[in-house]
Amino acid sequence: MSPGGRFAVTADADGILSTALSIALAPQHGDAWQSALAPDGNGLEVEGIGMIARAFSREELPLQFQYDESVDPVANEIWWIQSEFTSAHPTGTWAIISGDELRALVQAGSEMRQSRP
């Protein structure tokens, strides 16, 4: 975490994991991330930053993942992250992550933020 409170994730070239942390731990959400990112949660969105949502079917995946047979949102808990369009990424950025990985990432980010002086 930077001194200004922004998340920096190693090996996150597109900044999508940092975006996920910014969305989940946005001040307006408080601790809502715990229920919003639970297996039956509704996800989260922050206008101007992006959104996190669960895919329950292949059709709910971002287009670039819909035909990837290794990704099965029916058999597995799959969430997608979308960062909004920026000058660095004029088409936006998309990623998928398992529910357990997403919650572990956000939990670690929450703990880091809480331990800041």
Image (cartoon, helix red, strand yellow):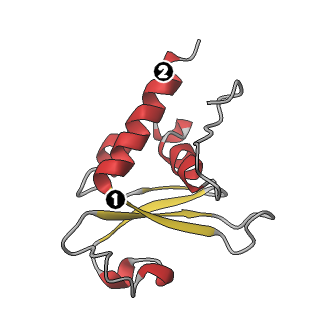
| Location of residue 72 in the rendering, given as x and y in whole percent from the top left corner | 27, 76
User: Residue 86 is drawn in which quadrant?
Assistant: bottom right
> In this picture, is 9 found above or below 70?
above
> In this picture, is 69 found above or below 53?
below
As drawn, the residue found furthest toward the left would be 75
Name which residue lies at 35% across and 49% down: 101
Circle 1 residue: 42
Mark 2 residue crowding within 10 angstroms, few (<14) / some (14–19) / many (20+): few
> In this picture, is 86 found above or below 64?
above
Mark 1 or 2, nearer chain start: 1
> Is residue 30 something that shows in the picture?
yes
Mark 1 residue crowding within 10 angstroms, few (<14) / some (14–19) / many (20+): some
Whether residue 33 sits left or right of residue 77 in the image: it is right
Name which residue lies at 67% across and 57% down: 48
Whether residue 112 sits left or right of residue 50 in the image: it is left
Circle 2 residue: 114
Whether residue 112 sits left or right of residue 68 in the image: it is right
